[in-house]
Amino acid sequence: MDSAELRVFEAVARTGGMNRAAAELHTVQSNVSARVRALETELGCALFERHSRGVALTPSGERLLPYARRVAWLLADATRAARDDGQPGGPLTIGSLETTAALRLSPLFARYAAACPEVDLAIRPGTTAELIEAVLERRLEGAFVCGPVAHPSLIELKMFEEELAILAAPGLASIEAATRGGIARIIVLRAGCSYRQRLEALLARRGVAVPRLMEFGTLEAIFGCVSAGLGITLLPRALIGPVWRAGRVSLHPLPPEEAMVTTVFIHRREAHLSSALRAFLDHARASETAGEGIVSSDTSDLVKPLPDGAPLALNEANRRNGP
Amino acid sequence: MDSAELRVFEAVARTGGMNRAAAELHTVQSNVSARVRALETELGCALFERHSRGVALTPSGERLLPYARRVAWLLADATRAARDDGQPGGPLTIGSLETTAALRLSPLFARYAAACPEVDLAIRPGTTAELIEAVLERRLEGAFVCGPVAHPSLIELKMFEEELAILAAPGLASIEAATRGGIARIIVLRAGCSYRQRLEALLARRGVAVPRLMEFGTLEAIFGCVSAGLGITLLPRALIGPVWRAGRVSLHPLPPEEAMVTTVFIHRREAHLSSALRAFLDHARASETAGEGIVSSDTSDLVKPLPDGAPLALNEANRRNGP
DNA sequence: GATGAGTTATCGTTTCTGGCGATGGCTTTT
DNA sequence: AAAAGCCATCGCCAGAAACGATAACTCATC
């Protein structure tokens, strides 16, 4: 078995046809057909069922396909690992929750970009669920997400400890005042994201229903709407401090067990840790000691993985609670 | 990058020379040299330093080598996965602690061998540390070891809950009677193995020193020596029950926190779960419901992985406590 | 039913990679 | 100084891989 054969196989399986695979691989159909045939005879079992509209995977092919992908990933990773000479450089694509980026990462990114000018740093925002998926699919080298994640193929580093607080219209004395009548309108940054489920659960425990949900793409818009009394929201307290001091909103602390949330940095366990990413994590550690806001006492601490069956996609905790 | 090139690279790295690698790969030295050269130009960095006595890996080569190994493993696994048609067959090599094999596995193996005659089942005894290493190195598909193991690349299924007890010469009323004078001679199955560290720790907590250690390869020899008053040992209570009832030895229970030990079945997380192994685990589950001794209520339960940095070799807990 | 578009299989030809053997340069050992 | 062992390089060649054309087949449409 050869990685070149698997590359052809994977293209055929993905495109669903040998013609399409040939076009993608910059070769001719007869060649693809011959390669697939060679692989099938080598394995002694059919990998595709041939139809008039293309091909479909047999059970054997289904079993082989994930290996073909992993081999391709592994070879790409091997190339990067061998070429990585220890000098941070090249592209580094990292994901982050929007609130974390706004609150914690600006100074870190600025210092890192200054120290490692050869690195093309890119930050992509997203929800915890989206970011975990992107890291697993290797579209991101790592991401700041809401922990704990507990996926067996991810390494998880505690980075920040955030205190969340409820934000409501100015002049309201308490959460109860903001949820009078047992209903509340809540405002979130993105529909699937950012403390929404956490806020809903929190209100549900207090017997408050959430009939309406408003979604705004920017934090400033959320501040404006909360200030205008359109609803309440849940955000890191450090983030809303300035707005609160300006008197635009009222801030309502939560009990610690509901308020505290850990932000972790995740990256693939078995992937090559690029020099760019390593330098980034070193900077994060340095920022921590410099008191720039990283709270965890040891960034190399792993959060305890979940004890359960560790699904390959997302675990329930993140589907439910994540921002 | 190609798996064939990596295969050549790995052979050169392992044998430390292109001539030796050529001999191993059934080809000529010039070819090996050309393949390595091609890989180096493709990667843009040297992989070996050439010396008069052979070659040595450069840092780039060091980084590439583990990937070469993993690609080779992955391709082998891919072949097995594609060929595995769901009918259990072929070789199945499993490791087990000797006491577990003696106490729990005979009926399971017998039933499995009868149900799956196409499988060449092989059982290899060893200590927990040895067996974990063998599974990680793919010399074993799985193993029964003393849990918890908590290695990120191993899946761990609770199988049995054993109660250990101390075995001493007949007529002794208590452990204290067997350890009079604060010293005890202990008898173990194998030097690195089987509850030895556990027994020593247990005695140390009672202020008993262990000046002498005797090692015997078979359980029957141990029973004989204990019966003759040469020393004490620690074994699963169910295993020593018949000997005790025959009056050959005295049996001394331990408090639950010292007595209970979990036997788990481990196998590689990312490896293909062969039909033979799957059928074996199904049989184990069936044995459980049939009350043949499997205690865990759910064999699919994962034991909690360790929270720490997850070393690639063995974790400390297993070096210290394992049988 | 004929036709055309789409698919894969197969064949002969061409290209070129990978393997071979010989040689040479180098270092270490004898 | 000779021998042994190592790797680099060259020319050569076989065989695999790629190519192009064609055949066979299915399906949708006319």
Image: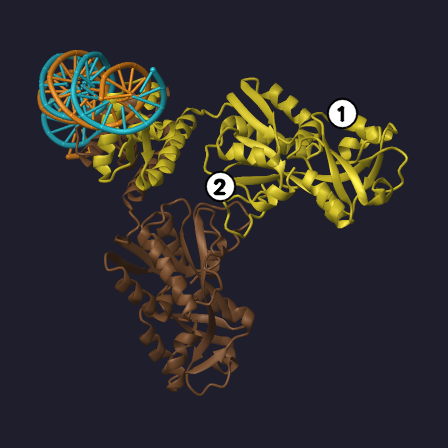
Chain colours: A yellow, B brown, C orange, D cyan
Residue A194: x and y in percent read 68, 35
Query: Which residue is more in the foreground, D24 or A102?
Result: D24
Residue A144, placed above or below residue A118: below
Horizontal relation, residue B133 to residue C19: left or right = right
Could you say whether the residue bearing mark 1 is in a helix, strand or loop? helix
Mark 1 and mark 2 residues within 8 Å of each other at the beta carbon: no
Callout 1 crowding tier (Cα within 10 Å): few <14, some 14–19, many ≥20? some
Seen from the viewer's position, the closer of residues C20 and A167 is: A167
Residue C12 in the image: x percent, y percent? 11, 17
Q: Quadrant of the N terminus of chain B?
A: top left
For disc 2, the marked residue is A153
Name the residue beneath numbered marker 1: A221
Q: How many marks?
A: 2
Q: Amino acid at mark 2?
A: Ser
Camera-nearest residue between A154 and A284: A154
Residue A298 figure quarter? top right
Mark 2 nearby-residue class (10 Å; few <14, some 14–19, many ≥20):
some
Q: What kind of residue is marked 1? A: Ala
The chain to which mark 1 is attached is: A
Instruction: Report whether residue A211 is seen.
Output: yes
Chain where mark 2 sits: A
Please indicate whether residue B143 sits to the left or right of residue B200 in the image. Answer: left
Q: Residue at x 25, y 26 (%)?
A: A33
Q: Which mark is residue A111?
A: none
